[in-house]
Image (cartoon, rainbow, N blue to C red):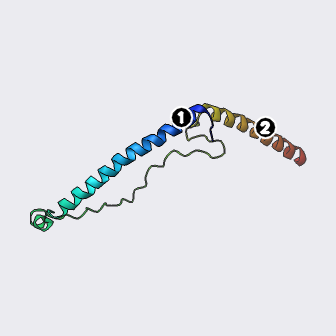
Amino acid sequence: MAKSLRSKWKRKMRAIKRERYGKKELEKLKMIVNNSLDKDSGDVNMSSLTDVVQVVSKPTVLSSDEPMEPMETNDNASNFGSNNKYPIWLGSSKRKKLIKRNKQLNKIKKKELKKAQKKRR
């Protein structure tokens, strides 16, 4: 990978931080485990709460037979939306490429139509 002095220095400093913070993290984890073992003996009995709280089932959602409004769909070939505009998420450079490609495809289609018309005559 990188062999510059800067990257070597950063790698060295990260290793030092890893050691220092590793010790602190280990002490913290040990303290948390000890605290959790102490708290296990004093757990709250939740069975007494069932008398106070009523359990309510989730209400069912009624499905309607009405058709939903269709989302705006894009034509896959030209990437136009239903209002003949490119979608907002399409970048300007991609839009330019699509316009160029669509022009070329239209030229090819026109040539093929002319050839087909000449053959019919």
Front label number (2 vs 1): 1
Q: Amino acid at mark 1?
A: Trp
Residue drawn at (66%, 32%) of the image? 96
Tell me the element at label 1.
helix
**Residue picked out by circle 2:** 107
Give the quarter of the image for residue 83. Answer: top right
- Residue 105 is situated, as x and y percent measured from the top left of the image, at 75, 40
Residue drawn at point x = 57 percent, y = 35 percent: 7
Q: Give residue 56's quadrant in the image.
A: bottom left
Q: Would residue 111 appear left or right of 36 to someone viewing this image?
A: right
Q: Mark 1 highlights which residue?
A: 9
- Residue 2: name its quadrant: top right
Q: Picture coordinates of residue 21 (x, y %)? A: 38, 44
Which amino acid type is shown beneath numbered disc 2? Lys
- Nearest the eye: 65 or 24: 24
Please tell me which residue is depicted at 87% across the width and 44% down the height of the picture.
115
Left or right, 84 with respect to 36, comes to right
Q: Nearer the viewer, residue 64 or 93?
A: 93
Q: Position of residue 68 (x, y in %)?
A: 43, 52
